[in-house]
Image (spheres, grey):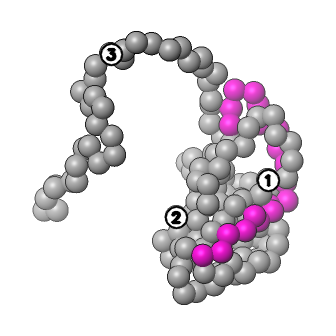
């Protein structure tokens, strides 16, 4: 079952139920051995574990993965090994991802002729620049 590792954690850890070796650049759907009923108005967001990503190059392929409230099947995680040289073996019970349940309000979209101005405007990717803060 998903569980929090520490008091105050925002997401629960989810574990593998199988042994599987991810070769470099391989992706696989790893079963986690449980299903759940997420309440209407909420969604489950499957997130990478930072230690797996930074130490081994293993991450959630479609991060964040989305679990809709009406899904009732087994929870599986789509993992990818981005390490170019080393395989990574997953064993039953290994924590492979995190699951956050968040409110997802239902909204409606309306076509408009213009949008109100904002400070950011149409500035997209990289528009805020690179931090130049001093480390002193």
Viewer-nearest residue: 113 or 60: 113
> Dividing the picture into quarters, in which one does residue 42 lie?
top right
CA separation in Å, label 2 and label 1: 20 Å
Q: Which residue is mark 2?
A: 50
Disc 1 residue crowd, few under 14, some 14–19, many 20+, Cα 10 Å: some
Q: Is residue 26 visible?
A: yes
Horizontal side of residue 83 vs 26, given as left or right: left
Q: Is residue 4 visible?
A: no
In the image, which is nearer the foreground, mark 2 or mark 1? 1
Viewer-nearest residue: 125 or 102: 125
Asked if 59 appears above or below 81 in the picture, the reply is: above
> Dividing the picture into quarters, in which one does residue 116 lie?
top left
Image quadrant containing the C terminus: bottom left
Q: Position of residue 6 (x, y in %)?
A: 59, 56
Q: Secondary structure at mark 2?
A: helix
Asked if 53 appears above or below 45 in the picture, the reply is: below
Closer to the chain start, of discs 2 and 3, is 2
Query: For the point 57% across and 47% down, which residue is it?
Result: 10
CA separation in Å, label 2 and label 3: 38 Å
Query: For the point 82% across and 40% down, which residue is it?
Result: 71
Q: Which residue is mark 3?
A: 116
> Dividing the picture into quarters, in which one does residue 17 lie?
bottom right
In the image, which is nearer the foreground, mark 2 or mark 3? 3
Asked if 44 appears above or below 56 in the picture, the reply is: above
Q: Secondary structure at mark 1?
A: loop
Closer to the chain start, of discs 2 and 1, is 2
Magenta span: 25-43
Viewer-nearest residue: 49 or 27: 27
Query: For the point 82% across and 44% down, which residue is it?
Result: 36
Disc 3 residue crowd, few under 14, some 14–19, many 20+, Cα 10 Å: few
């Amino acid at each position: 079952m998903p569980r929090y590792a520490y008091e105050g954690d925002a997401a629960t850890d989810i574990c593998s139920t199988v042994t599987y070796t991810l070769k470099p650049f391989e992706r696989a759907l790893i079963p986690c051995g449980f299903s759940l009923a997420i309440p209407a108005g909420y969604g489950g967001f499957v997130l990478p574990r930072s230690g797996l990503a930074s130490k081994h190059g293993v991450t959630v392929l479609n991060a964040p993965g989305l679990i809709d409230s009406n899904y009732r099947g087994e929870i599986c995680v789509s993992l990818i090994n981005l390490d170019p040289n080393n395989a990574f073996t997953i064993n039953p019970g290994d924590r492979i991802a995190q699951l956050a349940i968040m409110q997802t309000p239902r909204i409606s979209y309306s076509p408009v002729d213009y949008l109100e101005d904002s400070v950011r405007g149409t500035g997209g990717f990289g528009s805020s620049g690179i931090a130049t803060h001093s480390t002193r």
